[in-house]
Image (tube, rainbow, N blue to C red):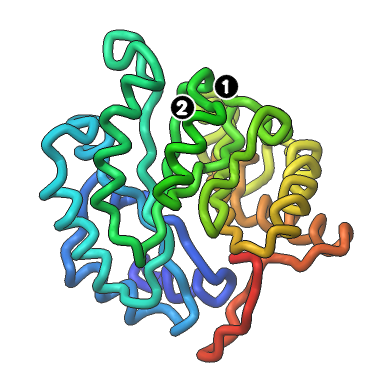
Amino acid sequence: MKPADYLAYYATKFDTVEVDSTFYRAPSAATVNGWARKTPDSFLFSVKVPQAITHEKMLVGAEAEFRQFVETMDSLGHKLGPMVLQFPYFNRTKFKSAGEFLKLLVPFMKQFPQDHKFAVEIRNKSWLDARFADSLRSHQVALVLQDHSWMPRPTQLFESFDPVTAGFTYIRWLGDRKGIEEKTKTWDSVIVDRSGELKEWVEIVRKVHKRRIQIFAYANNHYAGHAPATIELFRDMLRTSGLPEPAKSRGKEKQPTLFE
């Protein structure tokens, strides 16, 4: 099919998408309105905050740019899901400690509109502790739970502190980009068996499910080689475990669900 038809077709299989393109460049309002037109009323967009804010400016002097981005994303209306601030790994020339980073992040979070969902992802594993989580929790910002090659396993996080910091949870299955690109760049089949990791995630979802909060979960192709297959495997595991599987398109009436 034509690339212009991809999104509409995707929305017949899934109820949400994490938009990666917004990380590289903030889209126009016309583009965002086009996304809304091509998807069902129940569809949700999660969007990544531009890297100009998180990587280049590292939040400093980025307030106006951030407000403009949120205003543009508001064109999605009720289809707007979480907005994700994905930060890179910061070496000690950037921030000597998590505390130093929080001195910038906490004031920045104060401008977040309270009627929106926000999530924060960090790549410095030594910063993941109760103090960092509490800082996000005080602003109802979700800590991204990620499956990344050099980050702690989710079970380790739950054993160390409570990583659920908002009224929803955000999961990203990312994998090892460099490692898998040495094996493939076609992304049409499973290259890495992730069944063991996903089994662990089923137990994490079980913990979160008991708290009756919404869960957003996304996989990329670098996780196992073919993201749709990753999602189908996870859905099968949820069914087997007795947990409700992630939502599928339900037409105009959006039924209550714990999973997106």
Please name the residue shown 56% across and 30% down the image. 130
Please name the residue shown 43% across and 49% down the image. 141
Q: Is residue 112 above or below residue 72?
A: above
Amino acid under disc 1: Trp
How packed mark 2 is, by other alpha carbons closer than 10 Å (few <14, some 14-19, many 20 or more), is some
- Residue 243 position, x and y percent, is 81, 63
Question: Is residue 118 found left or right of 160 in the rendered image?
Answer: left
Marks 2 and 1, the one that precedes in the sequence: 2
Where's the N terminus, which quadrant?
bottom left
Question: Is residue 21 found left or right of 238 in the rendered image?
Answer: left
- Residue 154 position, x and y percent, is 67, 35
**Disc 2 secondary structure class:** loop
- Residue 203 position, x and y percent, is 79, 46
Q: Is residue 154 visible?
A: yes
**Residues at marks 2 and 1 touching, judged by CB atoms closer than 8 Å:** yes
Front residue of this view, candidates 19 and 98: 98
Residue 222 image label: none
**Disc 1 secondary structure class:** loop
User: Disc 2 marks which residue?
Assistant: 123
- Residue 117 position, x and y percent, is 41, 59
User: Disc 1 marks which residue?
Assistant: 150
Q: How many marks?
A: 2
Please name the residue shown 19% across and 50% down the image. 66
State how far apart marks 2 and 1 are (Cα).
Answer: 8 Å
Q: Is residue 19 visible?
A: no
Amino acid under disc 2: Arg
